[in-house]
Amino acid sequence: MSGALPVGRRAVIIDCDPGTDDALALWLAIASPEIDLRLVTVVGGNAGLARTVANARAIVGLAGNPVPVVPGAERPLRGRFAGERAVHGDDGLAGVVLPEGPPAVQALAADAIRAVLRDASAGSVTLVGIGPVTNLALALATEPALAGRVREIVLMGGAWGEGNWTPAAEFNAASDPEALDILLSLGPPVTLVTLELTMQALVTPARVEAIRRLGGGACLRAACDIMAAVPPSRRLGGEGHALHDACAIAWLVAPALFHAERVGVEVDCGPGPARGRTHVDRWGRSKAEAQVTLPETLDTEGFFALLGTRLSRLP
Ligand code: RIB
Ligand code: CA
């Protein structure tokens, strides 16, 4: 199996925790005609909710996009968010300062997501989760009938093997495993963009400079400044860092860049060291239903060419 549904313009809600790679994902989505961005909702995660909301406002504001930004959960269904300041800094954008964006909408993310879904026709809205998926789970778990309005749920999260937050778990999955477990069991088709996929979108100084040389406006420059400011990943050999969240958007706009398989996925919601681990059954050994589409390979050069071309379209 390869690629997602045929590429056409689709209505999309993005839930995020900006977050340096969230910024790139939002700008890629805004710059892509294949995406009709209806709503941006925000969750605490990489930084506190006040920061992630301010960053989301600034990111969409710099792109001059009127999409509503709505705050959501500042804690997971159980416990607390811990923040990932080693990667994103205390401000969430690795120290890159953007002009203040338009005000957030005074509402709650889960309510705003449900309002968009209620207005939608069956199977017409794509939900993209690029942070802990607390808001998406709250929206759908409290009104399960709305799941029928969802075309696809695309999540950056999880890992086949080693985690990047604990030895067992990837950050988004580890931050709210119960929320991820709810989304995997609700019914709409789920595509899970794991660490093994995103490590193929390795940001290196050469790739940043190649994008910067394209010229473009304030968004491209800020995107390159942010990518340049994120420290290289020890897990990936110190050569660069993975542009995790933008891969989830690329899946929607350029599925031909990917090869994907159908697999079964279970989330460990226990209290132990494996909490948040996504057990990916790649070979059908568990006899569990293969309910998840798992992009396995990425055309890396094609990905960065797409990213640069789209960023250069932004103001
Ligand atoms: O593990 C990577 C994920 O955690 C990305 O979404 C990044 O922004 C952080 O939220
Ligand atoms: Ca994120």
Image (cartoon, rainbow, N blue to C red):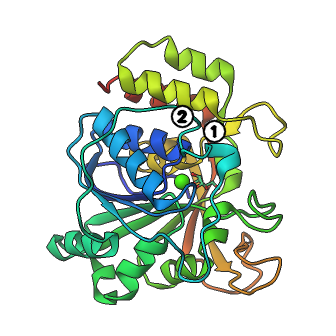
Amino acid marked by disc 2: Phe
Residue furthest left in the image: 119
Specify few, some or many for label 1: CA neighbours under 10 Å numbering under 14, 14-19, or 20 or more: many
* Numbered badge on residue 303: 2
Circle 1/circle 2 CB separation < 8 Å: yes
Is disc 1 placed on a helix, strand or loop? Answer: loop
**Residue placed at 64% from the left, 77% from the top?**
264
Q: Is residue 32 visible?
A: no
- Residue 280 appears in which quarter of the rendering? bottom right
Amino acid marked by disc 1: Ala
**Residue placed at 35% from the left, 88% from the top?**
142
**Whole-number angstrom distance, CA of label 1 to CA of label 2:** 7 Å
Q: Residue 231 location in percent, x, y?
A: 71, 35
Q: Is residue 3 left or right of residue 298?
A: left
* Numbered badge on residue 201: 1
Q: Nearer the viewer, residue 315 or 147?
A: 315
Q: Residue 41 location in percent, x, y?
A: 35, 61
Q: Residue 206 location in percent, x, y?
A: 66, 18
Quadrant location of ligand 2? bottom right
Mark 1 or 2 closer to N-term? 1
